[in-house]
Amino acid sequence: MFSGTQEIEKNLIKICAEEIFKAEHGQYDGYVASGGTEANIEAIWIYRNYFVEKEDADLSEICIISSEDTHYSIHKASNLLNISNVVVQVNEYHQISIPELERNVSKAIHDGKKYFIVVLNMSTTMFGSVDDINAVTNYFNLLHLNYKLHIDAAYGGFIYPFTNNESNFNFKNPDVSSVSIDGHKMLQAPYGTGILLIRKNYMPFVCNDNATYVNGKDYTLVGSRSGANAICMWMILHAHGSEGWTKKMRELTDKTSDFCAALSEMEVEYYRNPYLNIVAIKSKYVSAELAKKFVLVPDTHEGQPQWYKVVVMPHVHHNALSQFINELALELQ
């Protein structure tokens, strides 16, 4: 059914897995999901079933490890799959705190946990922070713990690999098992365009062959999926090309750097990863009126925000950024 659309989806997965995330040819699987939430849940579902079937694990022996800044879909996965989620505090750079990780994992082991599904962020939703993958995997490898590593790159997947040549959030890193990315964020595709990329031989752990009326088996969480979304992402990537998209993303981070330089000149406190286009400004510098005027995103809609987020996108001109800086400067004066 829809064999032409399927070929386009396969080519899209190939582009993302091999060209962006450096997988070896034919050593991966993947599909276009309804978004990063589904892709994250699918990965955790796969690893839960892997531990149960291959390691004879009890659900009480499996746990998710994630940071307090991790996307809420990980909490959904914990609830749906009936496995606990150990939430680790972040450090001043909004990365998983390694001392806190050691403390939490030691407690989890004491409580009977033997199998770990580790979720690391390649850009958190609010801060654009990127976890220290080497520090985390070195810790798990040093203790010879049984773990699978999933990278939540829902936001950063279509920018961070293009702006940071030294990134090892990819399949060249033997510790990485899967990655989720969203087309409806940086790629600006319609909603419903997430992608799961995973190493070969893991998808069978969620295979469902009960739908005998379908010519083929189902390995996905939602079953029926929109082929139009796969076509849309394929078209966008082919329209830009690798060099074109790299240029576009680097121009975006340059524009964000200029914005941050202006904030620094005014001694405004903010957080920003240099390879991304998210700037989180401490709320004490920004009035509620100014935040509303420029549609800044608060870290909470309940109570007093601590941070306001600016996302510098291609359609945001320097004039708009300058206007915000000028009005912020007047307020601070």
Image (cartoon, grey):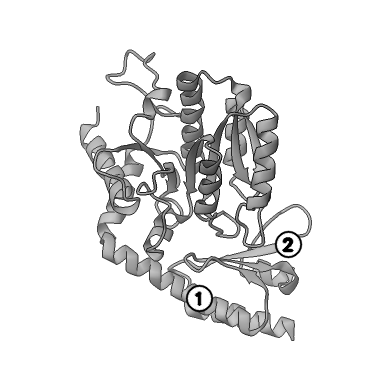
- Quadrant assignment, res 331: bottom right
Q: Position of residue 29 (x, y in %)?
A: 33, 36
Q: Quadrant of the C terminus?
A: bottom right
Mark pair 2, 1: CA separation: 22 Å
Q: Position of residue 42 (x, y in %)?
A: 47, 33
- Quadrant assignment, res 77: top right
Q: Is residue 159 visible?
A: no
- Quadrant assignment, res 102: top right
Which residue appears at 48% of the width and 46% of the height? 151
Which residue appears at 73% of the width and 60% of the height? 305
Q: Which mark is residue 305?
A: none
Q: Nearer the viewer, residue 182 or 138?
A: 138
Q: Is residue 153 visible?
A: yes
Q: Which residue is mark 1?
A: 257
Counting residues from the N terminus, which is met first, the one under dot 2 or under dot 1? 1
Q: Is residue 60 left or right of residue 17?
A: right
Q: Which mark is residue 306?
A: 2
Dot 1: what SS? helix
- Three-letter amino acid code at the position of disc 2: Gln
- Three-letter amino acid code at the position of disc 1: Ser
**126 is higher (above) or lower (below) than 225:** below
Q: Nearer the viewer, residue 41 or 109?
A: 109
Q: Is residue 202 left or right of residue 72?
A: left
The tally of labels here is 2
Which residue appears at 33% of the width and 65% of the height? 246
Dot 2: what SS? loop
Q: Residues within 10 Å of mark 1 (few under 14, many from 20)?
A: some
Q: Position of residue 139 (x, y in %)?
A: 56, 46
**230 is higher (above) or lower (below) than 127:** above
